[in-house]
Amino acid sequence: MKSISQVFIDHPRVAWVICIVISLCGAICLSRIPVAEYPNITPVTVTVSTSYSGASSDVLRESVATVIEDQINGVEDVWYYKSSCSGVGAYTCYVVFRPGTQPNIALVNTQNAVKRAESKLPEETLRSGINVKVRPEDRMVMYAFTTDGREMDVMGLSNFVEKQIADSITRVEGVSLVETGGRSYAMRIWLNPIRVAALGISIDEIKSAIEGQNVQAAAGTVGGEYANKYLFFKLNVKGRLKTKEEFEKIVVRSDPTTGAQVLISDIARVELGCSGYNTRWRYNDLPASSLQIYKAPEANAVETARRV
């Protein structure tokens, strides 16, 4: 009885055919089977950010950071966390979970912890909102958009980047979060301290007037609930203020007996400015707008950057 090796020696063409078939099968399988060279060891990081306008770093640490950290301390699978309090009232807490934790589970557990802390947080912080997002502490890539100022200023450029570009990049596979430089348009009201003090108007009074007169109100209907069987129409009233002139006409204080009024324009300067002036970006000595991109924990940084 001949051995297998002797059969192939006596029939070399059969050996060549079998060799070619095995090579083709291996090439086809190589392009289809999943291959993982390294395990996913990147820890999941959840960021909690909020602001307390006008507060110092010490006040922010005692009234916001301590309250949130007390609740985060008992969250399951938390590896470590660290907080930062700036002198302009901005607070950020990076909560790092152990490798292998599901990002969605980590996000939900952190949101629940922040929800439990809301009852002890200042009202100003709750009004500004608390953002809880899955994102690593370090940026994956950052882009700079520049302008020479002839056709578009830096605020217009920043607003364009935030409204037109950032939303599209957020939908790219592997991208967890996209942040801009925070220099989009906002209505700025610069108070005149001398006139405010002379009229005895407090800051809370000014804030209440702006919040009370800059609302989207629902006026209701006429003839609804069968009040009139011949007439029915919806009432549309003027909603939120949009222009500089509309903000200047906000009534801060009025006297019913004389009809005298104190308007925003009497005690402040109103302008369409930037939402924040704490940071400024420059590239090659030109005013710039930044676009910072963070990748998802399970995404490949090189491939995600290429898609962006």
Image: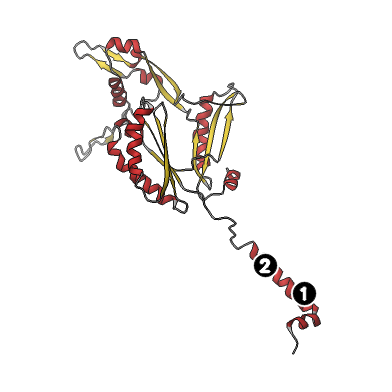
Q: Position of residue 276 (x, y in %)?
A: 45, 26
Q: Residues within 10 Å of mark 2 (few under 14, many from 20)?
A: few
Please name the amino acid that badge 2 sits on. Answer: Gly
Name the residue beneath numbered marker 1. 16
Q: Quadrant of residue 287?
A: top right
Q: Position of residue 177 (x, y in %)?
A: 48, 41
Name the residue beneath numbered marker 2. 26
- Which is nearer the eye, 94 or 129? 94
Check residue 87 in the rendering and tell me which mark sits there, or answer none: none
Q: Quadrant of residue 124?
A: top left
Residue at 50% across, 39% down:
178
Q: Is residue 274 above or below residue 77?
A: above
Q: Can residue 127 be seen from the camera position used here?
A: no
Residue at 75% across, 87% down:
2
Q: Label 1, secondary structure: give it.
A: helix
Quarter in which the N terminus is drawn: bottom right
Q: Is residue 251 above or below residue 131?
A: above
Q: Quadrant of residue 129?
A: top left
Q: How far separated are the C-alphas under marks 2 and 1?
A: 15 Å
Please name the amino acid that badge 1 sits on. Answer: Trp
33 horizontally vs 99: left or right: right
Colour setup of the view: secondary structure
- Which is nearer the eye, 164 or 45? 45
Q: Is residue 153 above or below residue 12?
A: above
Q: Label 2, secondary structure: give it.
A: helix
User: Is disc 2 in contact with disc 1, using a CB cutoff of under 8 Å?
Assistant: no
Quarter in which the C terminus is drawn: top right
Residue at 36% across, 32% down:
61
Residue at 30% across, 12% down:
197
Q: Can residue 39 be seen from the camera position used here?
A: yes
Q: Position of residue 82 (x, y in %)?
A: 42, 39
85 horizontally vs 225: left or right: right
